[in-house]
Image (cartoon, helix red, strand yellow):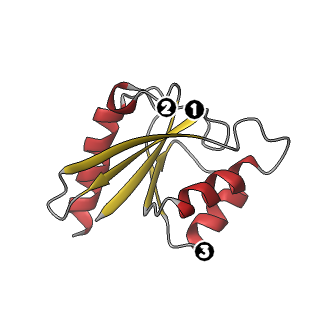
Amino acid sequence: MIKIAFPTEKCEGLEDVVHTRFGRSPCFTIITLDNENQIKEVKNIRNPGYEAASGAGVRSVQTLVDEGVNIIAAPALGPNAAVIAQEMGIKHISIPAGVKIREALETVLKEIRKEA
């Protein structure tokens, strides 16, 4: 199974949009795919980094590690978040901000298929 996390605006699942900033996004939409890359679960969680005074990206990555995420699909990760994600074996796939999660998921699936 694959778990993909998207930073999102409003915790509205597949109809939400990719937030501009990973560590400061209000929510994450986490999509779990089965072995045939079909959606098994869509989960929305609050991002503890959203209101953090500092270390927002690192807190965000740790939250996603705790959720068992394999892929972060976001416009960019800050330098500290990128290092932690890499150390934890989480792949980053660049997705533009403002795209609906449903469309962003298709982009991620294309990337997964390319690597298979």
Q: How many labels does the image show?
A: 3
Q: Is residue 44 above or below residue 112?
A: above
- Residue 20, label in figure: 1
Percent from the top left, x then y, of residue 94? 46, 48
CA gap between label 1 and label 3 equals 23 Å
**Amino acid type assigned to the residue bearing label 2 in the image:** Ala
Q: Is residue 16 above or below residue 91?
A: above
Mark 2 lies on residue: 97
Percent from the top left, x then y, of residue 46? 58, 38
**Amino acid type assigned to the residue bearing label 3 in the image:** Glu
Give the structural element (helix, strand or loop) at label 2: loop
Marks 2/1 in contact by CB < 8 Å: the verdict is yes
Percent from the top left, x then y, of residue 6? 46, 43
Which picture quadrant has residue 25?
A: top right
Question: How crowded is the residue under tag 2: few (<14 C-alpha within 10 Å), some, or many (20+)?
Answer: some
Give the structural element (helix, strand or loop) at label 1: loop
Disc 2 versus disc 3: nearer the observer? 3
Residue depicted at 53% across the width and 27% down the height: 9
- Camera-side residue: 74 or 27? 27
CA gap between label 2 and label 1 equals 5 Å
Mark 3 lies on residue: 87
